[in-house]
Amino acid sequence: MDTVDLDLLKYCTERKNYEAIGSTVDKSMCIKESWLLLGAMKDYYSEFDVDIIDPKDFKTWFRISKHPELKREAHELYSNIIDNVFSTEMPDSGPFKATVQRLKDGILLDQLVEQWRKGSISMEGITSRLEGTRPEAVSTHSEDISVTDLADHARHGGLYWRLEDLNRSIGPISRGDFIVVGKRPEVGGTSFLCSELTHMLEQLPEGGKVIVFNNEEEDWKVKGRIISTALGVDYRSIIAHPKKYNEEWEKWLGKREFKLVHDTNMTVASIRAKLEKEKPDVVGVNVLLKVGGTGKTEDHDKFQELGERFRVFAGLYAPMVAIVQADPSAEGEKFIPQDRIYKSKTALQGESDVLIMIGTDEDIVDHRRYIHVAKNKIPPSACTDVRQKHIKSEVKFDIDTGRFESVNFKKHSRGKGHVYTSTDI
């Protein structure tokens, strides 16, 4: 169980605390077990005149009176949760209420996203409402746009890609950008994510942080890929000389963090809680469709919901890069079109700012991959080329290090301190 859920339940073990926040908690703010226990606490306070819940009495009442229909395994689970709750220290009221307030903002997501889909509110409007300013959506009107205005609307700053092809097509990414990467199995989706996000971490100052949420491959495999792509060394060398490469890894990190969160049962709520706690600069998700907690049973509807939620997360926290599967018809296709995402013809595509498809030859030649930027709504920047907006490009996949490298464009030292010249574009 997440720390936020434990703190929430612990805080509500005192009547005065429950009365202060209990009625304002929405089930989207916590996991289903926490939601059931909060409902039980409400009934417990109504039935018994107590100011503080006694764990032994509460467990007996919960098992015999409140939920006798639950099976033995379920009661054992709830008994363990209750024990964990009461062994947790009471959270400090001020910081905890601030966290709850941010989680309560999640209640607005559905209605705000629906407004955004209808065009009645901008992404900035969603962000500001969730942060408390809550301006009403307004229409805009202008008589003329100057050259200076055009420059002001260009993309400035952000984080650059390791693949120069993507810098030419998409340019740097910033908070608010939701990027979806589609590919077939065993093409290198995890490696692509690690290759790009390790490059982005190098551009961050001290204290910078990248988080990858992984719910597919085993954690040690993904961590190995992260280190390989960061240091540019093959996995065999790392396991042969662990001390040497651990030192190089720590040196490479400096005072920054690259966190891997591995959970095969992760949900939208657990990811949101982690983002709220960590406040990262860049986020990766591997794999998006396996994230639970949407309440949707059909994959198409689930993709729609996940796309809406993660687009909002990108605006609230950091740019998001999410891996999805392409459908079987894309097998062996070099430049995959955007309608080949598995279980989604339009739902997820409509929510993304950028859709990158990774294809292969029919025989999947080890070192060749094909990049197609099938959708691109990112504003132009100094390094982008309008002719490459929907680029189709062959790239090199270094199967040993996991890095994706350009074969059609020369390498640039983009990022902190880079000054663009006419040769860049």
Image: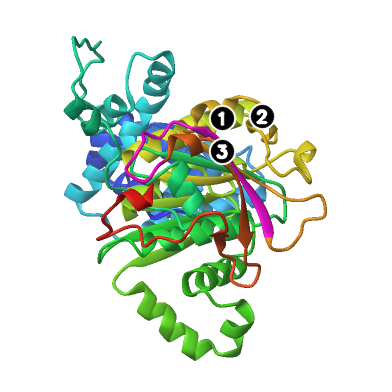
Looking at the rendered structure, the secondary structure element under dot 1 is helix
> In the rendered image of this protein, does residue 180 appear above or below residue 304?
below
| Picture coordinates of residue 70, whole percent (x, y) | 63, 41
Residue range in magenta is 368-384
For this view, does 327 lie left or right of residue 311? right
Of discs 2 and 3, which sits in the foreground?
2
As rendered, which of 296 and 156 lies closer to the eye?
156
Disc number placed over residue 100 in the picture, else none: none
Estimate the x, y position of residue 327 in percent, counting from the top left: 74, 38
Query: Which residue is found at the position 69% from the left and 63% from the top?
Result: 367
Residue 95 x/y as whole percent: 20, 50
Residue position for label 3: 67
Question: Looking at the image, which residue is at 57% across and 58% down?
Answer: 407
Q: Are marks 3 and 1 in contact (CB under 8 Å)?
A: no
Amino acid type at mark 1:
Gln
Residue 14 among magenta residues: no
Answer with mark 1 or mark 2, whichever residue precedes in sequence.
Answer: 2
Which residue ends up furthest to the front in the rendered image? 422
Q: SS for tag 3?
A: loop
Foreground: disc 3 or disc 1? 1
**Does the image show residue 133?**
no
Q: Residues within 10 Å of mark 1 (few under 14, many from 20)?
A: many
Label 2 amino acid? Asp
Residues at badges 2 and 3 in contact (C-beta under 8 Å)?
A: no
Nearer-the-camera pick, 45 or 260: 260
10 Å crowding of disc 3: few (<14), some (14-19), many (20+):
few
Q: CA distance from mark 1 to mark 2?
A: 8 Å
Numbered tag placed on residue 339 in the rendering: 2
Residue 255 horizontal side relative to residue 338, left or right: left
- In the picture of the structure, the residue carrying the numbered disc 1 is 349
Q: Is residue 381 magenta?
A: yes
